[in-house]
């Protein structure tokens, strides 16, 4: 699924303010009970905004990202930092995460790109990378909310560019298959993709089967309880000893 390009960066996390990133990291710190100097793994890190803010607060952050342009931008941002994060370019399914992490995060709806088998592979690798009692925070789309609010065709204008997204939900695979068409000055850009959507109970069952213990689920950064009425789910798990 090749969605990532300069337009997506600019219109996606490129629009997220520093204040919002700080609020995210305040939540990460509180939800994960990060110890001083904690070693944190940031998967699907994009341009590294969470890794960068974690590093500014004294944590040892490592971000992994497939898109080289995103990582190039992230590395430019950390040139003058005394405690810069480490960034690794690669496919999370294939590369070695290392081990001994106090925590792992997946933020900004960055999970569900792969088939079910590969999604579980990534989650098992997270388990292997964490210390015993290490914590895992995953922020993902809430399938129950998506289905209640499903829109087959969405039309928007972003920075003067007309964007049309057509979606179809497959009830047998729980995948949202979509086509995004952008009318840019040099012609039409078409992006196709498929996103695996999860309900809270599905994610909980998958991670508990791997060996995690469910700790909490939140519907927002204020730590209100997880419900089906919010677009995003933030779920916290702890690695148990085998």
Image (cartoon, rainbow, N blue to C red):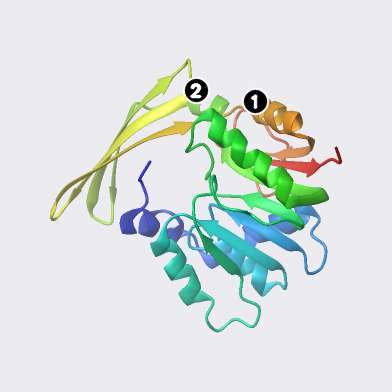
Q: Residue 174 carries which label?
A: 2
The percent position of residue 6, horizontal first and vertical second, equals 33, 59
What residue does disc 1 label? 202
- Location of the C terminus by quadrant is top right
Q: What element carries label 2?
A: loop
Q: In which quarter of the image is the N terminus?
A: top left
- Residue at x 76% of width, y 41% of height: 237
Say if 26 sits above or below 78 in the image.
Answer: above
Q: Which residue is at a point 61% across and 27% down the rendered structure image? A: 199
Residue 31 seen anywhere in this rendered image of the structure: no
Question: Residue 15: image x %, image y %?
Answer: 43, 59
| Residue 41 as seen in the image, left or right of residue 173 | right
Which secondary structure, mark 1?
A: helix
What x and y, as percent, mark residue 141? 54, 36
Mark found first going from the N terminus, 2 or 1: 2
Can residue 147 be seen in this snapshot? yes
């Amino acid at each position: 699924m090749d969605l990532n390009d300069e337009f997506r960066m600019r219109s996606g996390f490129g629009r997220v303010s520093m204040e919002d990133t700080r609020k995210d990291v305040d939540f990460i710190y509180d939800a994960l009970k990060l110890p001083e100097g904690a070693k944190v793994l940031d998967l699907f890190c994009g341009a590294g905004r969470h890794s960068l803010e974690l590093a500014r607060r004294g944590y040892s952050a490592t971000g992994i990202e497939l898109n080289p342009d995103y990582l190039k931008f992230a590395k430019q941002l950390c040139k003058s930092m005394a405690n810069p994060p480490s960034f690794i370019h690669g496919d999370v399914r294939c590369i070695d995460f290392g081990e001994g992490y106090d925590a792992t995060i997946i933020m900004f709806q960055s999970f569900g790109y792969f088939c079910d088998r590969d999604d579980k592979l990534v989650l098992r690798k997270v388990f292997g990378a964490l210390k015993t009692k290490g914590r895992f925070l995953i922020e993902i789309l809430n399938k129950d909310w998506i289905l209640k609010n499903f829109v087959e065709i969405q039309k928007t204008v972003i920075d003067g560019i007309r964007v049309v997204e057509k979606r179809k939900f497959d009830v047998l695979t729980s995948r949202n298959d979509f086509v995004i068409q952008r009318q840019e000055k040099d012609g039409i850009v078409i992006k196709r993709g498929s996103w695996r959507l999860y309900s809270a109970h599905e994610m909980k069952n998958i991670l508990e089967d791997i060996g995690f213990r469910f700790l909490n689920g939140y519907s927002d950064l204020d730590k209100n309880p997880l419900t089906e009425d919010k677009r995003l789910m933030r779920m916290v798990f702890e690695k148990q000893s085998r």
